[in-house]
Image (cartoon, rainbow, N blue to C red):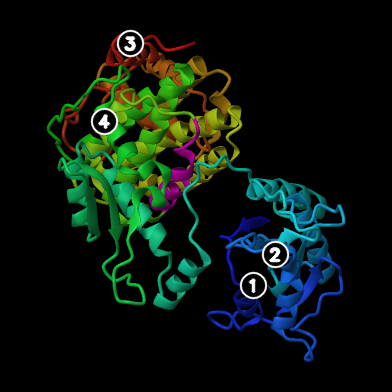
C-alpha cells in the first residue's frame, strides 16, 4: 500500500472537481465519499441534491475562524492511498477505516475532537483520495510535520493487519517516481514508459564508463537527447537538463529534466565524483588501454567483477558502496553492447539494480577503477555477436556478475537496506534468464564433447571431481551439465594444468549455494583461470588476448591492495 502526500494547494473546489470528475481518460468510476471527519458530510457523488460547492464549503468552514492575514495561502492537504496491483479489492468500509487511520497518523485528525475537516473520495477500486483543510476546528494549524513518513509507517501496519502486499520500506535514496500526470501523458503518447524513466535510463547508460565530462555530454547528444548546460560566469558548467525531442508541453516547448530530478546520483556534482576522486581524494584520470574486441572486454569485466567480490567480502563500507555503484555501470554497458537474445533480460537486470546502487553510505570513489574501466572497455569494444567467443564470454561475464550481485544483496540485507537488497535479488533473477540464453550454445557444444569422451576418461574425471570436491561431487555428477565440465577438465589438462588442483581452487573461490547449476559455474571458472577460449568451437590454439586470468583469491587480493595504494582491506 502506497500513500503519497501531494503538493499543498489553495483551491479545495478545484480538487473536488477533479476527484468527482471523469478523469483524464474517463478512468474515474462512480466517485463517492467513503469517510469524512464527522461521518455526515454531503456526498455529491451519490446525492443529486448535493453539489461539490456544498462539500467545499463544509471542509473550508474553519478558515473563517482566522483573522485578516492569518489564512494560509496553501491550505489544501491532499493524500492518495493506493493498493498494490495484486491486492484484493477492498470494500468501502475497509477503505473508510484506512482513511481514518491515515488522517490520525499524519496529524490531520489525531482524534482529539478538534482536528481538521477532511473527506475521503473513492473513484477507483484500488485507491482513495484524502482531502483536508489545514486549519483545525479550534483555529490552530495541525501538526502534520513529516506526514509522508508517518503515512508510510501506518501503511506498513495496515498491510500486515489486512494481509496485503508488504511494501519494502525505503530510506529516501530511491529515484523519484513518475507523477500521475507523467503516466497519463505516456499513455496518451503510446509510450511503454514515462519520459522521466526513459531519460533516466539514457543518462545512466551515457555515464557508464565515461572518462570525462565532455565524453558524457557527447554520449547524451549521440543518444538523441536535447541538452541544456547551466554555465557559471567563469565558463564552468554548473549543471545540466535533458529532454526528449518529441516530448513537448502545451506551448510546444521541450520538457527538460535536471539530472538530480532523474536520480540522486545523476546530478552533475555526483557524476563528477566518478572521474575525479581516488581513495585519497586526489585527481585521477584512468588509463585507457587498447580495446581489442567484445570478447576481450567481457573477459576483463569478469576479472574486475571477481576483484569486486573480494572487496565486498573484505573491504570497508565506502569501498564496497563504490564497487556496487560501478557494478551498475558494468550492467548498463553490457546491456548496451549485448546481442538481441540477451539484451531484454540484461536491461531488466540493469533497471532493477539501479535501485541497489544507492544508499546513504557514500561511495569511496577510486576503489571502483577496475569496474569502471571494464564498463568503458565494454562500451568502446562495440556490440557483441550473438555467437562464438562473444556469446560465450557474455555467458562467463553474466555468471560472475550473478555472484557479485548476489553478494551485493546479502551485504545490503546485513545493513538493513531492504529496498536495495530486494532490488539486487530481482536483478539476479533476470541475470539467471540472460545467462541461460547466452550459455545455451557454448555449453551445448561442450556437452557434446564431454559425451564423446571415452568411458575411461569419463571415469577418470569423475574421480577427479570426487577427490577435489567430495561434498559436492554426487550433485555435480548428476547434473545435466556434467559432460561440459568433463570436457573442460580435459582441456585444462591438455594445456598443462593439474585438473584436481585447478578444480579445488575454482571451488574455493566463492560459495556456490546460490548457483542452480554448479557444473556450469565451474566450467566458466576453470576456463577463466586456465585462460581457455570460452567458445569451445574456437579453432585458435592461442589464448584470447586481454588481461591474464587470475588463478587464486590471494593473488587478486594482492592486486586489489596495490590498486588502492597500500590500503589494507578490513577483515
Residue 302 image-quadrant placement: top left
For the residues labelled 3 and 1, say whether their Cβ atoms are less than 8 Å apart: no
State the residue position of label 3: 558
Question: Mark 4 to mark 3: distance in Å?
Answer: 17 Å
Q: Is residue 82 above or below residue 354?
A: below
Residue 2 image-quadrant placement: bottom right
Secondary structure found at label 2: strand
For the residues labelled 2 and 3, say whether their Cβ atoms are less than 8 Å apart: no
> Is residue 161 visible to the viewer in this orientation of the structure?
yes
Q: Nearer the viewer, residue 85 or 92?
A: 92
Question: Mark 3 to mark 1: distance in Å?
Answer: 66 Å
> What number is the disc on residue 300?
4
Secondary structure found at label 1: helix
Disc with the residue nearer the chain's start (4 vs 1): 1
For the N terminus, the image quarter is bottom right
Q: What stretch is highlighted in magenta?
A: 345-360
Residue at the outermost left position: 290
State the residue position of label 1: 12
Closer to the eye: label 4 or 1: 1
* Mark 3 Cα shell of 10 Å, populated few (<14), some (14-19), many (≥20): few
> What number is the disc on residue 488?
none
353 part of magenta stretch: yes
Residue drawn at (72%, 73%) of the image: 122
Amino acid at each position: 500500500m502506497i500513500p503519497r502526500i501531494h503538493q499543498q494547494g489553495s483551491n479545495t473546489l478545484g480538487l473536488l472537481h477533479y476527484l468527482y470528475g471523469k478523469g483524464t481518460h474517463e478512468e474515474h468510476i462512480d466517485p463517492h465519499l467513503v469517510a469524512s471527519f464527522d461521518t455526515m458530510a454531503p456526498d455529491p457523488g451519490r446525492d443529486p441534491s448535493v453539489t461539490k460547492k456544498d462539500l467545499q464549503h463544509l471542509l473550508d468552514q474553519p478558515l473563517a475562524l482566522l483573522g485578516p492575514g492569518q489564512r494560509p495561502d496553501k491550505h489544501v492537504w491532499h493524500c492518495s492511498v493506493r493498493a498494490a496491483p495484486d491486492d484484493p479489492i477492498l470494500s468501502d468500509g475497509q477503505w473508510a477505516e484506512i482513511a481514518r487511520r491515515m488522517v490520525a497518523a499524519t496529524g490531520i485528525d489525531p482524534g482529539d475532537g478538534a482536528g481538521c475537516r477532511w473527506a475521503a473520495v473513492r473513484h477507483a477500486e484500488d485507491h482513495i483520495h484524502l482531502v483536508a483543510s489545514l486549519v483545525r476546528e479550534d483555529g490552530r494549524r495541525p501538526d502534520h510535520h513529516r506526514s509522508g513518513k508517518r503515512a508510510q509507517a501506518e501503511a506498513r501496519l495496515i498491510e500486515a493487519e489486512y494481509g496485503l502486499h508488504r511494501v519494502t520500506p525505503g530510506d529516501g535514496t530511491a529515484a523519484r517516481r513518475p507523477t500521475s500526470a507523467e503516466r497519463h501523458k505516456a499513455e496518451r503518447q503510446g509510450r511503454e514508459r514515462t519520459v522521466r524513466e526513459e531519460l533516466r535510463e539514457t543518462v545512466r547508460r551515457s555515464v557508464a564508463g565515461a572518462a570525462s565530462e565532455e565524453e558524457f555530454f557527447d554520449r547524451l547528444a549521440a543518444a538523441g537527447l536535447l541538452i541544456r548546460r547551466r554555465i557559471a560566469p567563469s565558463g564552468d558548467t554548473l549543471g545540466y537538463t535533458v529532454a526528449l525531442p518529441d516530448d513537448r508541453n502545451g506551448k510546444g516547448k521541450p520538457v527538460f529534466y535536471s539530472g538530480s530530478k532523474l536520480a540522486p546520483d545523476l546530478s552533475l556534482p555526483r557524476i563528477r565524483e566518478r572521474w575525479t576522486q581516488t581513495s585519497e581524494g586526489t585527481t585521477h584520470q584512468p588509463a585507457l588501454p587498447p580495446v581489442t574486441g567484445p570478447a576481450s572486454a567481457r573477459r576483463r569485466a569478469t576479472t574486475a567483477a571477481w576483484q569486486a567480490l573480494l572487496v565486498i567480502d573484505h573491504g570497508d563500507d565506502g569501498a564496497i558502496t563504490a564497487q556496487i555503484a560501478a557494478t551498475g555501470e558494468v550492467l548498463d554497458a553490457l546491456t548496451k553492447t549485448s546481442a538481441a537474445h540477451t539484451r531484454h533480460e540484461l536491461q531488466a537486470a540493469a533497471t532493477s539494480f539501479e535501485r541497489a546502487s544507492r544508499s546513504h553510505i557514500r561511495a569511496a570513489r577510486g576503489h571502483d577503477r577496475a569496474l569502471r574501466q571494464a564498463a568503458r572497455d565494454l562500451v568502446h569494444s562495440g556490440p557483441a555477436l550473438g555467437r562464438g567467443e562473444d556469446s560465450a564470454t557474455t555467458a562467463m561475464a553474466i555468471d560472475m556478475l550473478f555472484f557479485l550481485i548476489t553478494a551485493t544483496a546479502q551485504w545490503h540485507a546485513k545493513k538493513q537496506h531492504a529496498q536495495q537488497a530486494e532490488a539486487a535479488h530481482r536483478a539476479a533473477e533476470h541475470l539467471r534468464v540472460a545467462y541461460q540464453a547466452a550459455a545455451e550454445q557454448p555449453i551445448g557444444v561442450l556437452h557434446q564433447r564431454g559425451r564423446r569422451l571415452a568411458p575411461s576418461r569419463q571415469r577418470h574425471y569423475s574421480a577427479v571431481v570426487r577427490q577435489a570436491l567430495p561434498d559436492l561431487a554426487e550433485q555435480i555428477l548428476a547434473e545435466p551439465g556434467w559432460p561440459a565440465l568433463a570436457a573442460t577438465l580435459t582441456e585444462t589438462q591438455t594445456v598443462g594444468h593439474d585438473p584436481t588442483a585447478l578444480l579445488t581452487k575454482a571451488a574455493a573461490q566463492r560459495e556456490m549455494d546460490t548457483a542452480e547449476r554448479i557444473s556450469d559455474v565451474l566450467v566458466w571458472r576453470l576456463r577463466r583461470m586456465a585462460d581457455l577460449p570460452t567458445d569451445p568451437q574456437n579453432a585458435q590454439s592461442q589464448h584470447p588476448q586481454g588481461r591474464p586470468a587470475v588463478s587464486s583469491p590471494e593473488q587478486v587480493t594482492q592486486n586489489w591492495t596495490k590498486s588502492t595504494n597500500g590500503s589494507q582491506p578490513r577483515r
